[in-house]
Amino acid sequence: MNDHFKDFSWVGSQENFVDKVNIQHIDHIIVGRYGGNSNAGQYKNEDGCLVWFNEREDWEFVIVLDAHNTAESAERVVALFENEKSHIRHLLSMPTTQKTFRMLEEKVLCMFQSKEFLSTCRNVKGETACLIVVRKDKYIWWFSVGDCVLYLFHPELSALGQYQINQRQFYEWIGQVNTFEQEVPCYSVGIKELRQGENRLFLTTDGLIECPNEPYSNPTTIDNAFFHSKDEENIKSMLKNIQENNVRDSTTIISWKVNILKKATIPSNQQANKY
């Protein structure tokens, strides 16, 4: 293992952060966690997350998980990826091509559809939503089961009203109820080019979005907040805000900035102005 690779993982059954806001830095990546309010009835945290990155190879690989009933399904997904770490790292070290992302999708599908993992899932209590996001070079790739959200904040996209990258899908899970047990598994996958300049990636479980009084149901609120304070302070204030709004559901946030030097795609009628 080289010094350029760093990793972190957590599941709410390890530490629940009920009534407690927690901010953790994994180098340039911020992980924010809040377990929900005990006076709203919360007593456990079934979220989970995983963060890997390699600065030299220019990639990040992150997962957020939002389980229910118990955290067992989130624990099993984290363990599955930890077991396949070396193979996934090898794929991410390859050149940035369509083939690399296609191989990554095939690898994830093989993992989720393996007989061993399907058997494991039948023996857990509850199920989890799962959002996997990879940033490599000037592209992001995502694989989503369920209702966790990926936002991309960049002025050119904000000007056109685009913030949310994946669509929340309900009635999709991995675990006791498992989309990968079906004849046709249901999931979303996609690739998007990042824009030139500063891009902010922001993943969250639904506690942030579905908080009472909906302070963050509109992504423009999240986008605007980053103009007024430092990243860590901003994420901390978001979690404190949902705490003050008496949120019951737990929230896990993963966010980081990527500065892209390469030019991004622009329409042909704007290109003429460049020459």
Image (cartoon, rainbow, N blue to C red):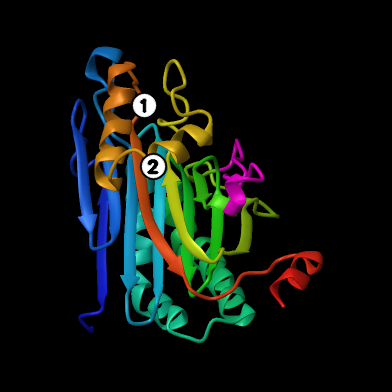
Residue at 32 percent across and 76 percent down: it is: 55
Neighbor class of circle 1 (other Cα within 10 Å; few <14, some 14-19, many 20+) is: many
Q: Is residue 198 left or right of residue 160?
A: left
Residue at 30 percent across and 40 percent down: it is: 229
Neighbor class of circle 2 (other Cα within 10 Å; few <14, some 14-19, many 20+) is: few
Instruction: Answer yes or no: is residue 123 visible.
Output: no
* As drawn, 267 above or below 127: below
Residue at 70 percent across and 54 percent down: it is: 183
Let me know if residue 159 is in the magenta part. Answer: yes
Q: Nearer the viewer, residue 273 or 66?
A: 273
Let me know if residue 90 is in the magenta part. Answer: no
- What count of labels does the image hold? 2
The amino acid type of the residue labelled 1 equals Asp
* As drawn, 184 above or below 247: below
Residues drawn in magenta: 156-172
Q: Image quadrant for the C terminus?
A: bottom right
Q: Which mark is residue 227?
A: 2
Helix, strand or loop status at disc 2: loop
Q: Dominant secondary structure of the magenta stretch?
A: loop
Residue beneath label 1, please? 249
Q: Nearer the viewer, residue 255 or 200?
A: 200
Q: In which quarter of the image is residue 246?
A: top left
